[in-house]
Image: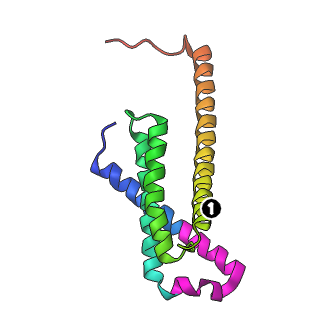
Amino acid sequence: MKFNVKMVLQYIIYGISLGCTSFVIMCLGFFAAGGKDFLAPVFANFAKQAVGAMIVGIACGGTAIVYRCGGLSRLAQTAIHFFVGMGVFYPVAIYLGWIPFHPGKPLFSVMQFLLACGIFMAIRFCFYLFYRKEAKEINERLKELEKDGDDTVPPTSI
């Protein structure tokens, strides 16, 4: 597939909207769980937090463009998406305090990373199931059209 500037910009905007929407939903959840005091660190540097959410959105949502690459295997596409997404998310999340970082507790950091990997895999698996179901429905519809429409489709003349 040939990429163009419009397509890349669409994916970047998609990533930004994904990051901003996730940020707002998480803030609403934190507000419901702990009130204003729980969100005080976010509001203290709101601009950095919002920009961080956009950057992570671009890295995670925007890099989904890799699935439009026909020359790569699904495993390679998923690996690129994972490594770019996690490679951006983790440093941003640590810098902005979204996840605590304790250099003296390596097991804690490893467990956090594994949890993040598990979340990524769960989300990816949900997308896989969704697209598999969609492909099955499309294939069933095509089979129906083949059965019903052999005589109804007019021949094309060249």
Could you tell me which secondary element the residue under label 1 belongs to? helix
Name the residue at 57% across, 16% down.
146
Above or below residue 22? Residue 33 is below
Residue in view at x 57 percent, y 23 percent:
142
The one nearer the camera, 102 or 17, is: 102
Q: Position of residue 25 (x, y in %)?
A: 60, 70
Q: Give the amino acid at mark 1.
A: Met
Q: Which corner quadrant of the image does residue 47 belong to? A: bottom left
- Range drawn in magenta: 22-43
Residue 6, visible in the rendered structure: yes
Decide: few, some or many residues near mark 1? Use Cα within 10 Å; few <14, some 14-19, many ≥20. few
Whether the magenta-drawn stretch holds residue 39 is answered as yes
Q: Main secondary structure of the magenta part?
A: helix
Is residue 27 depicted above or below 151 in this figure? below
Q: Which residue is mark 1?
A: 111
Q: Nearer the viewer, residue 72 or 143?
A: 72
